[in-house]
């Protein structure tokens, strides 16, 4: 650290504000905000820094600058502006420069309504932006089915219409427009429709419904039942659209909702705009982690950026967890129960689904990166000193202690390595004793690997609870391997993960990829063990039947079975085949034994 930087660190202010790190070439490395600049900046120069990326960045810092502001919220706004302007390498950024569509109500007589990606400041109204174009198109199509609006770009100023220079077009004749160009529809009636449409776009359907009900009632009272039926169908269409988009209590109005999930490398943030119980905007983004930022830090950045992107001025924000700052005039709420809690959970669900979608894409495009991410996740969740690149799983199979086998399956980089699978036949255990069998098999497996100098796994998975796990641990201790290899047990009923020293099991998220890999190892060990147990039991049954033949010993039985594979084929074999396998004397004995009756 250079002397200038040391001096700066000693004279830092304790106010809220923004700090900026620069390297020796004057390149901006990082912009951060803090409630207390001095405490925050000095924490970066702590010798116990966690995270190699943070340590790399700190090693490059040559000088720093600070700016004091009145509050932490002002610091957050300034930080956001500086990140946008300078795009420092080590800052979290939502690299999303797409132009999203807006619904435009044009500032003109008899306004047109259409989708656009360009905002023109001519007094027109713009609603959005819409993160996905499909919901915006569905909304516009619904509006156009309910209301007959003009689509032409004629200048329908009153004096132009009065001149009589316009004629109705095909849209009028196919009943998509009511012909305001020839004064066949009044401006007053048209403006009522526009007002109702504003409500629909904002999630308020009351004006639109009242307009259609009044129109239907008017037609019915004039005995125009066909027209009344057409209006009723449009009302049904509106109610159907409302039902599909109302997700919470209609009293929840003008609220922003944020949901979030994250892993080692990225965070995924979902945003809902709620009006009258309807989701009128939905947006999800992926945010890459740069220097081990916390979920709270990332959500703070995302909240400010997304509200700016969607031009939101909602006075209430629903969050999945508390944030350590305030926005003037805005309530930040972490709901515990009720409809507000459910809408936050729905937002979190959207964030999780978006993450899974992204991970599936990575798995196809970059399988190595996908594997590395899973290995990192498993290391963290299972509290391991190293990534579990080599996993071995064990399971015992027997029926009331008969024909016992123990299966050992091997996974490398999360995938089965079937060439390394092994089957053990217990040698020191009599009867059905899973604990003693597990103790013997674990000792034999790793004694052999040690003797032969073969690589040891980073993770051992035992199919069973605390009992089987404790038995396996005994053998690792005898071999001096306990503490050098992570060993866990997994119980089937609730998918509980047991650790040797822990009394409380770990419960992983049911959608966790770590749990899915552990389940796959467990299930593969069970499948492999059951397969060999059945084979051994079948062979035992066959050999028992053949052992009853006088003059036929174990070697002859094995020879027969190796050639003919089953007792049925041995029974049906011609005497010539049996004599060819065993010789004339023994072949004749076997043939006569099965064919004497």
Image: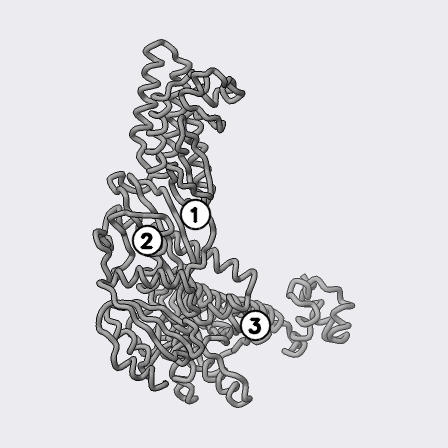
> Which residue occupies 25% across, 77% down?
12
Distance, label 2 to label 3, CA atoms, is 42 Å
In the displayed structure, would residue 331 be above or below residue 429? above
* Residue where numbered disc 2 is placed: 258
> Which residue occupies 34% across, 9% down?
222
Q: Nearer the viewer, mark 1 or mark 2?
A: 1
* Residue where numbered disc 1 is placed: 131
Mark 2 or mark 3: which comes first in sequence?
2
Distance, label 3 to label 1, CA atoms, is 44 Å
Q: Could you say where residue 386 lies in the image, as x and y percent from the top left?
A: 44, 79
Q: How is the image coloured?
A: one colour
Q: Quadrant of residue 506?
A: bottom left
Q: Note whether residue 433 is visible.
A: no
Q: Could you say where residue 274 lies in the image, as x and y percent from the top left?
A: 31, 44
Placement of the C terminus among the 4 image quadrants: bottom right
* Residue where numbered disc 3 is placed: 417
């Amino acid at each position: 650290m250079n002397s200038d930087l040391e001096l700066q660190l000693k004279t830092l202010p304790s106010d809220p504000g923004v700090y900026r790190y620069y390297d020796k070439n004057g390149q901006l490395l990082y912009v951060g905000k803090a409630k207390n600049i001095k405490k925050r900046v000095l924490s970066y120069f702590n010798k116990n820094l966690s995270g190699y990326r943070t340590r790399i960045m700190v090693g490059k810092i040559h000088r720093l600058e600070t700016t004091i502001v009145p509050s932490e919220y002002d610091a957050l706004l300034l930080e956001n502006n500086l990140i946008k302007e300078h795009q420092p390498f080590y800052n979290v950024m939502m690299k999303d420069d797409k132009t999203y569509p807006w619904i435009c109500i044009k500032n003109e007589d008899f306004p047109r309504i259409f989708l656009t990606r360009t905002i023109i400041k001519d007094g027109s109204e713009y609603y959005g932006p819409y993160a996905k174009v499909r919901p915006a198109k569905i909304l516009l199509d619904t509006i156009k089915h309910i209301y007959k609006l003009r689509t032409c770009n004629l200048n329908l100023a009153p004096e132009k219409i009065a001149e009589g220079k316009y004629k109705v077009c095909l849209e009028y004749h196919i009943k998509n427009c009511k012909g305001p160009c020839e004064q066949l529809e009044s401006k007053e009636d048209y403006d009522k429709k526009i007002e109702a449409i504003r409500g629909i776009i904002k999630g308020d359907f009351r004006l639109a419904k009242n307009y259609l009900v009044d129109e239907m009632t008017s037609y019915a009272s004039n005995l125009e039942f066909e027209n009344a039926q057409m209006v009723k169908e449009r009302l049904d269409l509106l109610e159907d659209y409302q039902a599909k988009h109302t997700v919470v209590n209609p009293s929840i109005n003008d609220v922003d909702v944020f949901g979030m999930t994250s892993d080692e490398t990225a965070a995924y943030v979902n945003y809902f705009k709620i009006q009258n119980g309807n989701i009128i905007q939905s947006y999800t983004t992926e945010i890459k982690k740069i220097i081990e930022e916390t979920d709270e830090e990332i959500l703070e950045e995302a909240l400010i950026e997304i509200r700016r992107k969607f031009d939101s001025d909602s006075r209430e924000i629903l969050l999945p967890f508390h944030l350590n700052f305030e926005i003037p005039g805005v309530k930040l709420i972490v709901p515990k129960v009720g409809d507000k809690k459910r809408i936050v959970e729905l937002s979190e669900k959207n964030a999780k689904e978006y993450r899974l979608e992204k991970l599936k894409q990575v798995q196809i495009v970059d399988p190595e990166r996908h594997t590395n991410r899973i290995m990192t996740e498993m290391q963290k969740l299972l509290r391991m000193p190293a990534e579990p690149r080599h996993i071995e799983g064990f399971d015992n199979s027997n029926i009331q202690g008969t024909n016992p086998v123990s299966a050992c399956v091997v996974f490398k980089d999360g995938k089965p390595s079937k060439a390394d699978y092994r089957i053990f036949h217990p040698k020191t255990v009599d009867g059905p004793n899973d604990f003693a069998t597990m103790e013997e098999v674990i000792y034999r497996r790793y004694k052999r690997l040690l003797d032969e100098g073969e690589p040891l796994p980073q993770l051992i998975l035992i199919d069973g609870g605390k009992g089987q796990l404790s038995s396996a641990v005994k053998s690792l201790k005898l071999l001096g391997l306990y503490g050098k290899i992570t060993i866990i047990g997994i119980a089937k009923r609730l998918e509980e993960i047991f650790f040797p020293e822990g009394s409380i099991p770990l419960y992983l998220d049911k959608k966790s990829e770590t749990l899915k890999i552990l389940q796959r190892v467990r299930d593969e060990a069970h499948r492999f063990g059951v397969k060999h147990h059945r084979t051994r039991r079948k062979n035992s049954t066959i050999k028992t039947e053949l052992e009853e033949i006088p003059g036929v010993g174990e070697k002859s039985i094995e020879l027969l079975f190796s050639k003919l594979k089953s007792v049925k084929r041995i029974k049906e074999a011609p005497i010539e085949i049996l004599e060819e396998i065993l010789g004339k004397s023994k072949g004749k004995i076997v043939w006569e034994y099965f064919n004497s009756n």
